[in-house]
Image (cartoon, helix red, strand yellow):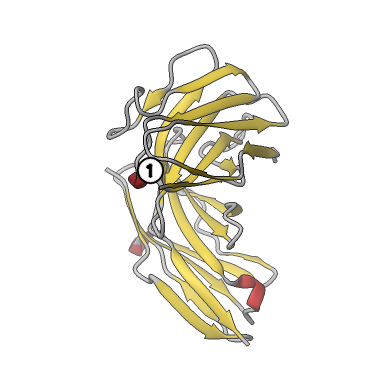
């Protein structure tokens, strides 16, 4: 299994500002994923980030609002831009754990709890 | 399109009771994977089990067991002799065709009380 860390673990931000969330993995992985979990809700995939290419965004999410970087095989960032209270959520990073085995399994980081005032 | 339904929003049990969490999935693909994740209050998602569509054997791991029935498109999760530490939100998830996307259910909040 992969060990995933996220920074910050939580933050309280003002409306209109931006926050960049970092995700670090202890091994090289091809695919990294960013999810949003709104209060009391399930997880929704924001985008898939592959190293060396543009992130692929899911319906309802756009690059201007959630720019993603993937500079190498162990690191990614997600920025939540021009925040509003509706962006208050847990943001989770995950990695594809297949490593040549059964696909689809993902390991998750501890999440970043964001509150926007 | 894929869909995962967890009809039980919240379940409360007394410690040592057995509890079953239901999961019903929808997909037209013949190759898919089903997962259960646990999310304790700390927020981190903990992987519990993966099942592929070609393996309908039930599985037992300690107090946990899973019942996979393709005939009813269900992948239910039973905790035997529940403990307070089992209190968490449990998510069932579906991956189709071994691709990248996990489709999550809405989760079941399990509360185990003394």
Viewed as shown, does residue B78 lie left or right of A88? right
From this view, report whether residue A90 is shown above or below residue A52. below
Residue located at (61% from left, 36% from top): A97
Residue A84, given in percent of the width and then of the height, sits at: 34, 41
Q: Depth check: give the residue in front, B69 or A92.
A: A92
Q: State the count of labels.
A: 1
**Within-10-Å neighbours for mark 1: few <14, some 14–19, many 20+:** some
Chain letter of mark 1 equals A
Q: Depth check: give the residue in front, A20 or B113.
A: A20
Residue located at (38% from left, 43% from top): A87
Residue B52, given in percent of the width and then of the height, sits at: 50, 48
- Quadrant location of the N terminus of chain B in the rendered image: top left
Residue B114, given in percent of the width and then of the height, sits at: 63, 88
From this view, report whether residue A105 is shown above or below residue A74. below
Would you name the residue on which mark 1 appears?
Answer: A87
Q: Secondary structure at mark 1?
A: helix
Residue located at (59% from left, 62% from top): B40
């Amino acid at each position: 299994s992969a060990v995933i860390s996220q920074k910050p673990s939580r933050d309280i931000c003002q409306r209109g500002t931006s926050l960049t969330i970092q995700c670090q993995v202890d091994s090289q992985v091809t695919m990294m994923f960013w999810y949003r979990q709104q209060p009391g809700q399930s997880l929704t995939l924001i985008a898939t980030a592959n190293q060396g290419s543009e992130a692929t965004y899911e319906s309802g999410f756009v690059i201007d609002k959630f720019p993603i970087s993937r500079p190498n095989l162990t690191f990614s960032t997600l920025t939540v831009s021009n925040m509003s209270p509706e962006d208050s959520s847990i943001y989770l990073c995950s990695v594809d754990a297949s490593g040549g085995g059964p696909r689809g399994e993902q390991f998750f980081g501890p999440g970043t709890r964001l509150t926007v005032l | 399109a894929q869909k995962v339904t967890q009809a039980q929003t919240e379940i409360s049990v007394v410690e040592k009771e057995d509890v079953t969490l239901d999961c019903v999935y929808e997909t037209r693909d013949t190759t898919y994977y089903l997962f259960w994740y646990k999310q304790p209050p700390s927020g981190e998602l903990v992987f519990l089990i993966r099942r592929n569509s070609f393996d309908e054997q039930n599985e037992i791991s300690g107090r946990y067991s899973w019942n996979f029935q393709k005939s009813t498109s269900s992948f239910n999760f039973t905790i035997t002799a529940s403990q307070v530490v089992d209190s968490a939100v449990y998510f069932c998830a579906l991956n189709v065709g071994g691709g990248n996307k996990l489709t999550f259910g809405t989760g079941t909040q399990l509360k185990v009380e003394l």
